Image (spheres, grey):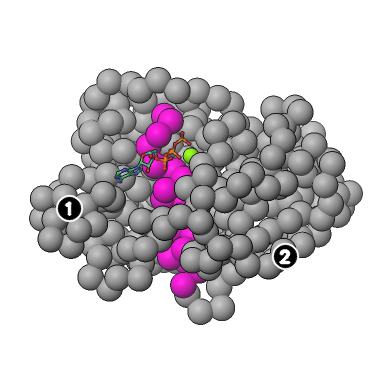
Amino acid sequence: MTDTKRGSQARQTVPVLFREEGVVAAERLVPIIETLKDPHSPVGEELRLLRANLRAIRQKRPQKRQLGCLAVVSALPGEGKSTISLGLAAALAREPGHRILLIESDLRRPGIAHQLGLSPHPGLGEWLNEGLEPVPVRFVDPGGFFLLSAGATPLERAEDVGSARMDALLQAGREQFDLVLLDATPILPVADVILLQDLVDGFLLVVRSRMTPRAAIHDALGRIRPEKVVGVVLNDHREYRSSYMAYAYHGYGMRAGSELRSVGGSARSSGHTEGDGEEPGR
Ligand SMILES: Nc1ncnc2c1ncn2[C@@H]1O[C@H](COP(=O)(O)OP(=O)(O)OP(=O)(O)O)[C@@H](O)[C@H]1O
Ligand SMILES: [Mg+2]
């Protein structure tokens, strides 16, 4: 069965209802969200730039809704996917009237609830295990986005992250939110992103400065369809540490990349990558 047929069948057979559970207060200050409140923060500025780049990329598409669901991915663990997902979701949510759904779709090492200081909450795992209806989403303050947590119980079948049920969930999300953002797993250690790739409209590839080996980016782009990568984000870029130390936000440096034109991870992607460092373990 083709992906399109599988998707449309899922849309007909799996009813998806979201239940908005009200506001949940983050128990921890998340630095990347805080940067958005400071008009002088260079990181806040980079997030606004990333938001603007994303808007421009979406508007270029023939149908705006075609990029209604994006996954934040990286080649290796620990490159900053959860951090960038949080910052981008909060930046997008600051646009008046925009409803952003952030999904903690890394069910192996979920990082969003932890960074917000929230305890595990029934969510995606339980819903995919078919033990939960409807889909619970919480409005996170500060942040201003809706969160679907990874859940409190593990996934019974690892492959369900790419199932028709997941497809139906994302389709309903596209219809009910202005953008659905998935904080995903790294590409190389596990198959989840490959399973997800027909279900999402595009990937944002996070590359950590001085850490991600070029070969890892190349291998990662070999595992997914490179045309699905709509942009790269260079995270933890040192330039800001030296030039903006006075702003006291040196803990996070990042740079938003433009749309990838080349495939296979050569020219543009390696141009954004500084490191040829050692490959970290998962
Ligand atoms: N620009 C940065 N500057 C300093 N620390 C950072 C930066 N980006 C991320 N970190 C820190 O690096 C660690 C890994 O970041 P994060 O959890 O966002 O990565 P991840 O890609 O989601 O990891 P995983 O693959 O394990 O899910 C966290 O402790 C985070 O606070
Ligand atoms: Mg993470």
Q: Residue at x 41, y 55 (%)?
A: 30
For the N terminus, the quadrant is top right
Where the C terminus falls, by quadrant? Answer: top left
| Residue 86 part of the magenta segment | yes
Camera-nearest residue between 84 and 175? 84
Horizontally, residue 222 falls left or right of residue 233, namely right
Query: Quick check: is 192 in the magenta stretch?
Result: no
Q: Does mark 1 have its CB less than 8 Å from ligand 1?
A: no
**Whole-number angstrom distance, CA of label 1 to CA of label 2:** 38 Å
Label 1: which residue?
Answer: 240
Residue 47 in percent (x, y) is at 35, 61
Q: How many marks?
A: 2
Dominant secondary structure of the residues highlighted in magenta in the image: helix
Q: Is residue 104 above or below residue 77?
A: below
Tag 2 secondary structure: strand
Query: What's drawn in magenta, residue-wise?
Result: 76-94
| Above-or-below relation of 75 to 91 | above
What residue sits right under mark 2 in the picture? 20
Q: Could one spot residue 64 in this view of the protein?
A: no
* x, y percent for residue 110: 56, 39
Q: Is residue 5 above or below residue 22?
A: above
Kindly identify the residue that appears in the image at 84 percent across and 41 percent down: 131
> 189 or 230: which is nearer to us?
189
Q: Residue furthest front?
A: 27
Identified by mark 2, the residue type is Glu
The circle on residue 204 is none
Residue 279: give x, y in percent of width and height.
Answer: 33, 21
Mark 1: which amino acid? Answer: Tyr
Within the displayed image, which quadrant is ligand 1 positioned in?
Answer: top left
